[in-house]
Image: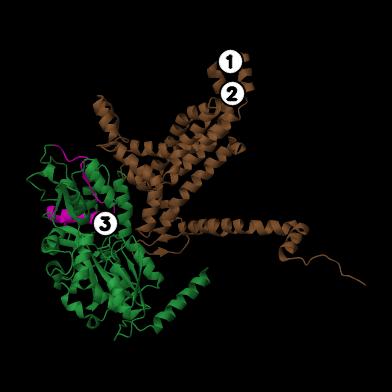
C-alpha cells in the first residue's frame, strides 16, 4: 500500500514568495518599477517637455508658438521688466531665508537643548500646528492682520507708535500704503509660512551637537560667544543649510502669497502662471520656469559642499 | 519629431478637406440625451450653489438632455478646451469668440432652428464678436460693463464722473489725496481702459478702438498706466479680495464689476457705481457650437433654452450682468427687474467697448500691438517699469 506525499498543493502566494526568495532581484524590480516610472515619466518627462518648450519662441505678429529651436526666448528673460521679476524673487527668497534662520535658530536651540518632556511636546505642537491649517486660510488671515484697518495698525496707533509704522511704510522700495500692500508685508507672510521648515532641520542638527564638546570648549576657557561661533554654529550649519533649501525654494516657487499680500509686482511663479495661462506665451513661461531650477541647482551644489546632506 | 509633425499636418489637411466648410445644421433630429458645455464659473447653475438659482434641471426634464458642465477660468483655457474637442458648446467672451471662428473650431448657427432668436436684443443680433461676414456663429448669452465703483461716504454728493479718479492724482471730495486709495484690474486687458480714457482726453492720438493701438498710442497708454502705478497700492485680481480691500484697506474707488458692487451693497457697505463719461469697457459672451459637436440637437435645444426670459432674468441677477432678451427685465418671469437691469448697465450699451483680443492685423489701422505684448508690458508696468 502506497500513499502519496502529504504535502498540500502550493497556492499562488506560496509560489510567488518562493520565486522572490530564489530571485531577489525580481522582487526588487517589482517594487522599484512604479516609483521609477513615476519619477522618470511623470516628473522628468514633464520637466523635459518644459525644457523643450523654452527653446521655442512666440511669433511676433500672430502670437503663435513657433516650434523651431531658438535662444530668443531666453534672451527675453534679460529684458529689464523680466530681470526685475527674477531679481525681486531672488531678493525675497534670500531675505526670507535669512530671517527664518535668525528667528528660527534660538527657537531650535531652546528646543534642542533645554526643552524636556512636556515642553518638548509643546514645542513640536507649536511648530507644527500652523502647518495643519490650510495655507490659504493663513494667508488670508495675514491679509486682514496687516490691512490698513487691521489689528497691527490699530495696535500701533493706540500705543502711540503709529509714527513708527508710518516710517517703516515710507521706506522707499519696500514700503507702501499699508503693510498688506507692501513688500514688507509679503516678506512677513513668507517668513511666517515657511518658518517651520527652517526650525525642524535646525533642531535636528542642534540635537546632534554633543554636550561634551561644549563642556570641553568652556573647560578650555572659551567664552560663550566663542563656543557659539567655533563649535555650535559649524556643527549646526548642515541643519541651517538644509532648512534654507526649503525656505529658499519654497519662496522662489510661490505664486499665491504675493498675489494676496503685496504690491502686485510679479514674482517668478506669478509670471509663469500669467504668461502660460492668459497670454499663451508658453515658451517664455517655460524659460521663466527654468530660472528657479538653475538657481536651485547652484544652491544645492553649494549646500552639498557645506555638508547639508550629511544631516539628512 | 519633424516627421511626426508632418504626419499631423497631413492628417489635419485631410480632415479639413473632407469637412465641408460652413456646414450648419439644417434640421433637428431627436435629442441625443446629453449636451456638454464649457462655461465660466457660475454661468450655468443647477441650484447647487443656491437652490433658487437653477436653470438646468427644468431643461433636463423637458428635453432629456443631460447637461454636463466643464468650467474654465480664462478665455485661453476655453480656446484650448475647444481645440481639444469633445464638447458641444462654449460661453465664449469677445476675446475668445473670434479666435474660435478664425480657428474653425465653431460652426455657424442656423437661427431658423432657434425660435427665440427673434427676442434677442436688436443691439446684439449682429454683434461683430459672433457675426462674421453676415454668418452667425452663436447666440448671445449675457453681457455686462466694467463699472467705476466708489465709496459713497467719501464721494458724498459728488459721485465721480470721470475715470480720472483712478488715473490721475487728485484730491477726493473728502479732502485727502487719492494716492493709495484707488485700484485697477491686474489683467493686461486694463490697458484698454487706459486707451479709452485717452480717446476722450487726448484725441490727437487718434485712437478709434481701445483694443486696436499702434505703437504710439500704445506707448501713451502705458505712460498713463505708469502714472497710475503710483496711485495704486495693490491691483485687484480676485473679486472677493477687491471687496475686502474696499472694507479693510481704505480703497475708495476702482474699476470693478456689478457683481462686487451688488454684493457689497447687499452687505450694507456704502458703495455705488457709475459708468463715467468716457464710457467703459465690458464683456459680451456668446454661446458657440463646436464644429464637431457630438450632440447637435441637444445643443440647439440648449441655445433655444438660454434665450428664455426666465433663464436670462435669473442669470442676470446671479451674475450682475445684462440679459440679451430685453423682456427678461420687465416681464417678471424671473428675479430680474427693470431697476436691476438699469443698475447692471442695460441702458449704457453704446458707452461700452466690449473686450476683444488685440491682434497685430487690426481693422482700423493695419498694424497694432498684439495681446502677448500687452501681457509682458503690463507685467513691467505693475513691476514699476
| Residue A122 at least partly seen | yes
Residue in front for this viewpoint, A46 or B91: B91
Q: Earlier in the sequence, mark 1 or mark 2?
A: 1
Find out whether the residues at labels 1 and 2 contact each other: C-beta distance under 8 Å: yes
- The residue carrying pointer 3 sits among few (fewer than 14), some (14 to 19) or many (20 or more) residues within 10 Å by Cα, namely many
Residue A83 in picture, x, y percent from top left: 39, 45
Q: Say the numbered circle drawn on residue B189.
A: 3
Find out whether the residues at labels 3 and 2 contact each other: C-beta distance under 8 Å: no
- The residue carrying pointer 2 sits among few (fewer than 14), some (14 to 19) or many (20 or more) residues within 10 Å by Cα, namely some
Say if labels 3 and 2 share a chain. Answer: no
Q: Nearer the viewer's eye, disc 3 or disc 2? A: 2
- Residue at image coords 57%, 57%: A38
Helix, strand or loop at mark 3: loop
Q: CA separation, marks 1 and 3?
A: 65 Å
In the picture, the quarter occupied by the N terminus of chain A is bottom right
Q: CA separation, marks 1 and 2?
A: 10 Å
Left or right, residue B320 beside residue B342? right
- Residue at image coords 37%, 36%: A188
Disc 1 designates what residue? A222
The question of residue B186 being in magenta is answered with yes
> Measured along the vertical axis of the image, is residue A230 above or below residue B320?
above
Disc 2 designates what residue? A231
Q: CA separation, marks 3 and 2?
A: 58 Å
Residue found at the far right of this picture: A1
- Residue B321 placement: quadrant: bottom left
* Chain identifier, colour green: B
Of all chains, the one bearing label 1 is A
* Chain identifier, colour brown: A
Residue in front for this viewpoint, A98 or B87: B87
Amino acid at each position: 500500500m502506497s500513499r502519496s506525499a502529504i504535502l498540500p498543493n502550493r497556492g499562488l502566494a506560496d509560489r510567488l514568495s518562493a520565486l522572490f526568495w530564489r530571485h531577489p532581484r525580481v522582487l526588487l524590480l517589482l517594487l522599484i518599477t512604479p516609483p521609477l516610472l513615476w519619477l522618470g515619466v511623470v516628473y522628468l518627462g514633464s520637466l523635459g517637455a518644459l525644457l523643450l518648450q523654452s527653446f521655442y519662441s512666440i511669433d511676433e505678429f500672430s502670437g503663435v508658438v513657433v516650434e523651431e529651436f531658438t535662444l530668443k526666448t531666453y534672451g527675453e528673460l534679460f529684458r529689464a521688466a523680466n530681470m526685475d521679476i527674477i531679481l525681486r524673487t531672488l531678493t525675497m527668497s534670500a531675505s526670507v531665508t535669512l530671517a527664518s534662520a535668525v528667528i528660527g535658530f534660538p527657537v531650535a536651540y531652546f528646543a534642542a537643548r533645554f526643552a524636556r518632556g512636556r515642553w518638548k511636546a509643546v514645542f513640536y505642537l507649536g511648530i507644527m500646528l500652523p502647518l495643519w491649517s490650510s495655507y490659504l486660510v493663513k494667508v488670508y488671515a495675514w491679509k486682514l492682520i496687516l490691512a490698513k484697518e487691521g489689528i497691527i495698525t490699530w495696535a500701533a496707533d493706540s500705543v502711540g507708535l503709529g509714527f513708527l509704522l508710518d516710517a517703516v511704510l515710507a521706506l522707499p522700495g519696500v514700503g507702501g500704503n499699508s503693510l498688506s500692500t507692501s513688500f514688507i508685508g509679503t516678506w512677513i507672510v513668507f517668513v511666517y509660512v515657511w518658518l517651520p521648515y527652517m526650525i525642524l532641520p535646525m533642531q535636528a542638527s542642534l540635537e546632534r551637537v554633543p554636550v561634551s564638546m561644549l563642556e570641553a570648549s568652556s573647560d578650555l576657557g572659551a567664552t560663550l560667544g566663542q563656543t557659539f561661533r567655533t563649535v555650535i554654529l559649524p556643527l549646526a550649519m548642515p541643519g541651517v543649510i538644509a532648512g534654507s533649501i526649503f525656505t529658499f525654494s519654497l519662496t522662489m516657487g510661490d505664486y499665491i502669497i504675493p498675489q494676496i499680500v503685496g504690491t502686485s509686482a510679479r514674482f517668478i511663479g506669478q509670471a509663469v502662471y500669467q504668461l502660460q495661462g492668459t497670454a499663451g506665451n508658453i515658451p517664455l513661461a517655460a524659460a521663466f520656469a527654468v530660472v528657479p531650477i538653475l538657481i536651485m541647482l547652484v544652491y544645492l551644489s553649494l549646500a552639498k559642499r557645506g555638508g547639508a546632506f550629511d544631516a539628512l | 519629431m519633424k516627421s511626426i509633425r508632418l504626419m499631423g499636418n497631413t492628417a489635419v489637411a485631410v480632415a479639413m478637406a473632407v469637412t465641408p466648410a460652413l456646414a450648419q445644421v439644417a434640421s433637428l433630429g431627436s435629442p441625443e440625451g446629453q449636451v456638454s458645455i464649457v462655461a465660466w464659473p457660475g454661468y450655468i447653475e443647477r441650484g447647487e450653489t443656491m437652490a433658487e438659482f437653477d436653470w438646468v434641471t427644468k431643461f433636463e426634464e423637458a428635453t432629456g438632455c443631460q447637461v454636463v458642465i466643464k468650467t474654465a477660468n480664462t478665455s485661453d483655457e476655453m480656446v484650448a478646451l475647444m481645440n481639444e474637442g469633445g464638447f458641444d458648446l462654449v460661453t465664449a467672451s469677445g476675446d475668445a469668440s473670434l479666435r474660435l471662428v478664425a480657428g474653425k473650431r465653431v460652426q455657424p448657427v442656423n437661427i431658423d432652428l432657434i425660435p427665440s432668436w427673434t427676442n434677442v436684443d436688436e443691439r446684439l443680433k449682429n454683434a461683430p464678436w459672433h457675426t462674421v461676414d453676415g454668418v452667425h456663429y452663436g447666440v448671445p448669452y449675457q453681457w455686462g460693463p466694467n463699472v467705476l465703483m466708489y465709496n459713497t461716504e467719501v464721494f458724498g454728493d459728488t459721485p465721480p464722473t470721470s475715470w480720472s479718479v483712478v488715473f490721475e492724482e487728485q484730491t477726493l471730495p473728502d479732502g485727502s489725496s487719492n494716492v493709495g486709495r484707488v485700484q485697477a484690474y491686474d489683467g493686461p486687458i486694463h490697458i484698454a481702459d487706459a486707451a479709452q480714457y485717452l480717446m476722450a482726453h487726448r484725441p490727437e492720438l487718434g485712437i478709434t478702438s481701445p483694443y486696436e493701438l499702434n505703437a504710439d498710442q500704445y506707448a501713451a497708454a502705458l505712460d498713463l498706466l505708469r502714472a497710475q502705478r503710483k496711485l495704486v497700492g495693490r491691483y485687484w485680481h480676485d473679486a472677493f479680495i477687491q471687496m475686502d480691500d474696499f472694507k479693510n484697506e481704505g480703497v475708495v474707488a476702482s474699476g470693478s464689476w456689478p457683481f462686487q458692487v451688488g454684493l457689497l451693497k447687499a452687505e450694507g457697505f456704502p458703495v455705488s457705481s457709475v459708468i463715467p463719461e468716457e464710457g467703459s469697457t465690458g464683456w459680451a459672451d456668446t454661446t458657440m457650437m463646436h464644429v464637431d459637436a457630438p450632440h447637435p440637437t441637444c445643443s440647439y435645444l440648449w441655445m433655444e433654452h438660454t434665450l428664455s426670459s426666465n433663464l436670462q432674468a435669473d442669470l442676470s441677477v446671479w451674475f450682475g450682468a445684462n440679459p440679451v432678451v430685453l423682456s427678461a427685465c420687465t416681464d417678471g418671469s424671473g428675479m430680474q427687474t427693470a431697476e436691476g437691469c438699469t443698475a447692471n448697465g442695460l441702458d449704457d450699451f453704446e458707452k461700452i467697448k466690449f473686450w476683444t483680443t488685440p491682434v497685430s492685423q487690426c481693422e482700423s489701422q493695419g498694424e497694432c500691438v498684439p495681446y502677448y505684448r500687452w501681457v509682458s508690458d503690463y507685467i513691467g508696468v505693475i513691476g514699476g517699469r
